[in-house]
Image (spheres, helix red, strand yellow):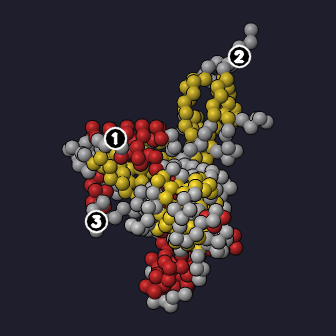
């Protein structure tokens, strides 16, 4: 009688070629198959499967392998938020907040949350990450400083996440609030974003979870017109129309009042901009003009988008992780656009030097010089000028040169093709630095 070894087969579908696979914490090498899957022959048992592709994506799952069975597992890589723990001695509040973070991200279905509280707890104090130190660091003008570069290096080495979150209760006895310190994996900024949330709130953590969007959309609809609001008009007023743009093609003129736009009556300029930002590609919108009373159909153009780094609701560690993943997988977005957005986020994080390095890596020949209007090279020069002016006195002359270049194009824009003009802002910055307006 011949005894056969008991074993089953685990088939991994959609596994990237360069991904690392671990079973119960041990690295393994699946056998690739011609159909694009990869498989492992395993003894019967319960296995935790972990798949990582650098800092850009993680997958974790649990499978039960039976003798002579085949288990198919679809691998969907998502950016990983590593929970490093909730500091503070109010155990009830800490447990409630930790559970809420996990539940909120599972419901949002955007990032995978890896709870590494038990693994990180013995090492946090050695990095200066104690509840008392972080409470002091949260105070304005605090003398306590945390070496976030060292913290980031440690977290990357230990956990390989896309971003990291450490919670700190504001009180050790009865904590009603907590600070959530969120920071990026390398090459993102190590300086954390701090968000204060109410422990008992039903909306604070879910709202944070929905801000962690893994799918970037670096384009939006463009009307090709500048709008403003007036108390004398029942709707947004057209200040100017871009030659060749969607508004010009529809026959709109400066001075026209838009009394209805995509179902919005008496719309403000902001309401129209927000509707355009969410409009699907190639979808037409209807609008009514006061001058004629006619209802027109207009198909907006598409515009590249530079993230508004001044937005107070922006969670920049999450956005940077998404940009980094797009660069790693060589996505369809232009490389210059991804790098421009990375530089903007680095500036938002207070890392002017790395922002400068990122802008200077951009192949300027690949960046469109937009005429007559749009997002392009002038936005890159303006961002470079901002970063240089924050980098120290020795870089002020170079900052003036960057602002002067940005001011030379009268109608190029910031953020998107319908955004604010670069030239007036660049000239204002130039004047502040003692330069001559362009």
Q: Which residue is tagged 1?
A: 202
Q: Neighbour class for label 3 at 10 Å: few (<14), some, many (≥20)? A: few
| Residue situated furthest front in the rendering | 292
Mark 3 vs mark 2: in front: 3
Residue in the picture at 61% in, 19% down: 66
Q: Is residue 138 left or right of residue 378?
A: left
Q: Compare marks 1 and 3 and give the one earlier in the sequence.
A: 3
Q: Nearer the viewer, residue 279 or 201?
A: 279
Q: Neighbour class for label 2 at 10 Å: few (<14), some, many (≥20)? A: few
Q: Nearer the viewer, residue 374 or 181?
A: 374
Q: Is residue 224 left or right of residue 436?
A: right
Helix, strand or loop at mark 3: loop
Would residue 196 be visible to someone looking at this image? yes
Query: Horizontal and vertical percent for residue 136?
Result: 27, 60
Q: Nearer the viewer, residue 421 or 353?
A: 421
Q: Which residue is tagged 3?
A: 140
- In 3D space, how far apart are the residues under numbered discs 1 and 3 (Cα atoms)? 28 Å
Question: In what quadrant of the picture does the N terminus appear?
Answer: top right
Q: Nearer the viewer, residue 290 or 235?
A: 290
Q: Which residue is tagged 2?
A: 4
- In 3D space, how far apart are the residues under numbered discs 2 and 1 (Cα atoms)? 55 Å
Q: Is residue 263 left or right of residue 94?
A: right
């Amino acid at each position: 009688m011949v005894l056969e070894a008991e074993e089953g087969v685990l088939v991994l579908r959609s596994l990237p070629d360069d991904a690392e696979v671990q079973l119960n914490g041990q690295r393994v090498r699946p056998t690739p198959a011609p159909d694009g899957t990869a498989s492992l022959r395993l003894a019967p048992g319960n296995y935790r499967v972990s798949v990582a592709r650098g800092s850009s994506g993680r997958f974790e799952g649990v499978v039960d392998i039976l003798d002579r069975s085949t288990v198919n597992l679809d691998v969907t890589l998502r950016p990983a938020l590593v929970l490093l723990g909730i500091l503070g001695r109010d155990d009830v509040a800490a447990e409630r907040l930790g559970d809420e973070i996990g539940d909120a991200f599972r419901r949002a279905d955007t990032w995978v949350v890896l709870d590494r509280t038990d693994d990180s707890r013995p090492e946090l104090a050695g990095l200066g990450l104690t509840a008392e130190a972080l409470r002091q660091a949260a105070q304005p003008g605090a003398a306590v400083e945390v070496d976030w570069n060292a913290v980031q290096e440690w977290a990357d080495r230990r956990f390989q996440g896309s971003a990291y979150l450490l919670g700190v209760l504001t009180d050790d006895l009865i904590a009603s609030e907590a600070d959530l310190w969120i920071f990026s994996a390398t090459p993102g900024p190590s300086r954390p974003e701090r968000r204060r949330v109410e422990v008992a709130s039903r909306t604070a953590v879910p709202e944070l979870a929905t801000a962690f969007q893994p799918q970037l959309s670096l384009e939006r609809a463009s009307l090709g017109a500048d709008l403003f609001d007036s108390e004398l008009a029942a709707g947004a007023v057209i200040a100017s129309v871009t030659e060749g743009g969607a508004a010009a093609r529809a026959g709109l003129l400066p001075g026209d009042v838009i009394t209805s736009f995509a179902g919005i009556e008496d719309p403000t300029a902001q309401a129209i901009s927000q509707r355009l930002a969410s409009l699907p590609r190639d979808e037409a919108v209807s609008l009514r003009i006061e001058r004629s009373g006619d209802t027109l159909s207009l198909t907006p153009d598409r515009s590249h988008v530079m993230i508004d780094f001044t937005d107070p609701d922006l969670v920049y560690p999450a956005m940077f992780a998404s940009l980094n993943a797009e660069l790693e997988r060589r996505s369809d977005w232009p490389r210059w656009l991804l790098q421009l957005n990375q530089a903007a986020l680095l500036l938002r994080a207070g890392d002017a030097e790395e922002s400068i390095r990122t802008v200077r890596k951009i192949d300027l020949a690949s960046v469109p010089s937009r005429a007559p209007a749009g997002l392009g090279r002038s936005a890159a020069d303006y961002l470079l000028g901002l970063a240089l002016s924050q980098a120290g006195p020795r870089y002020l002359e170079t900052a003036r040169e960057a602002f002067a270049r940005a001011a030379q194009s009268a109608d190029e824009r910031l953020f998107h093709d319908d955004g604010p003009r670069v030239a007036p802002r660049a000239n204002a910055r130039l004047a502040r630095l003692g330069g001559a307006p362009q």
